[in-house]
Amino acid sequence: MQEEVTQKTIALVIKTSKLSASVLKAAMRIYLNHQKQKSQKSHGKTSVKKLVGEGVGVSSIEVTDSNIKSFERVARKYNVDFAVKKDRTCEPPKYLVFFKGRDADALSQAFKEFVYGNEKKKGRTSVREKLKHFREAVSQDKNRERSREKNKDRGQSL
């Protein structure tokens, strides 16, 4: 019984006219890449059902910002598994971000970075506003009269 558990067999089906070492090598490489991708866990946005189904304690944070998409990028950077649920019972709608209890420290750091980035974006002036300001400055310069003084003193001075 123990040997059956430790030894695994796989079934690999290949359609080929002639089975050679290179074809077998390519098939094994494809199979191993597939298994590698399958075993890697993806972090980031998931459903609440999957998050609760993993058997780990789930916590939540309430977010009122409607720009929740930019938070997803920051959360993926910190490898946080989270689920976003929109609470439509109040106006304006609030978002509940569910996450695993063990990811609390990583999520708090992700929220700090998210808030810092949003504040930084709000403080900046847009490029269009800067261009509008420069256009107005240039148009005022063109309208200003320029006084032209010609100096005809070409003589030598002591």
Image (spheres, rainbow, N blue to C red):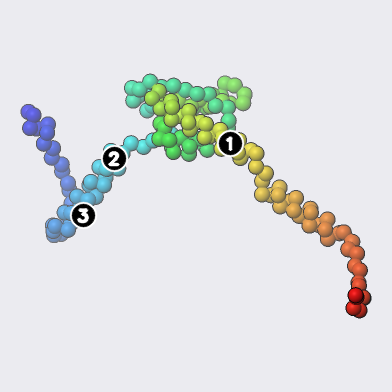
- Residue 136 at least partly seen: yes
Residue designated by label 3 = 26
Q: Position of residue 120 (x, y in %)?
A: 60, 38
Question: Foreground: 49 or 55?
Answer: 55
Q: Is residue 4 left or right of residue 69?
A: left
In the figure, 18 relative to 76: above or below?
below
In the figure, 137 relative to 119: above or below?
below
Residue designated by label 2 = 38
- Residue 48 at least partly seen: no
Task: Say which amino acid is labelled 1.
Answer: Asn
Q: Is residue 10 left or right of residue 122?
A: left
Q: CA distance from mark 1 to mark 3?
A: 48 Å
Residue designated by label 1 = 118
Q: Position of residue 124 (x, y in %)?
A: 65, 42
Secondary structure under the numbered disc 2 in the rendered image: helix
Q: Is residue 68 left or right of residue 134?
A: left
Q: Which mark is residue 67?
A: none
Is the residue marked by circle 3 packed among few (<14), some (14-19), or many (20+) residues within 10 Å? few
